[in-house]
Amino acid sequence: MTILLIIALLICVVGLYFTIIAGKRTDSGYSNQTATKNMTWMYAIVLPVLCAFLALFYYLLV
């Protein structure tokens, strides 16, 4: 169970890193709406994949 918490924490840190990097972009043609849209899609795709991975990993451990 502890390993799952460590993996979840690692995933959260990686997600935070990518969010900060995506938010710090300075491009004159890059609007806030585009940044929000891109981050939304990133989380909409990555979050279910990570949840499925964690569920599979938990299933294999138990």
Image (cartoon, helix red, strand yellow):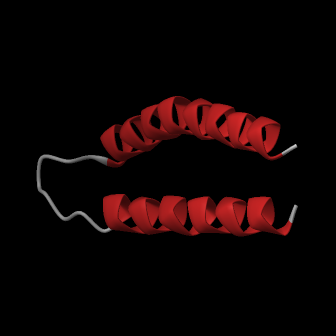
Residue at image position (40%, 60%) is 18
- The quadrant the N terminus occupies is bottom right
> Looking at the image, which residue is at 51% across and 58% down?
15
56 shown above or below 20: above
Residue 39 picture location, percent across and down: 44, 43
User: Height in image: 9 above or below 42?
Assistant: below
Quadrant position of residue 23: bottom left
Task: State left or right for residue 56 relative to residue 43.
Answer: right
- Can you say whether 18 is above or below 33 in the image? below
Q: Is residue 49 left or right of residue 52?
A: left
In this picture, residue 53 sits left or right of residue 21: right
On the image, which quarter does residue 17 sit in? Answer: bottom left
Number of dots carrying numbers: 0
Say which quadrant the C terminus sits in. top right
Vertical side of 44 occupied by 62: above or below: below
55, 36: nearer the viewer: 55
Residue 8 lies, in percent from the top left, at 70, 59
Residue at far left of view:
28
Q: Residue at x 84, y 68 (%)?
A: 2
Residue 13, image x and y in percent? 56, 69
Comparing 23 with 57, the one in front is 57
Decide which of 49, 3 is in the foreground and name it.
Answer: 3
In the rendered image, residue 53, in percent from the top left (x then y), is placed at 62, 38
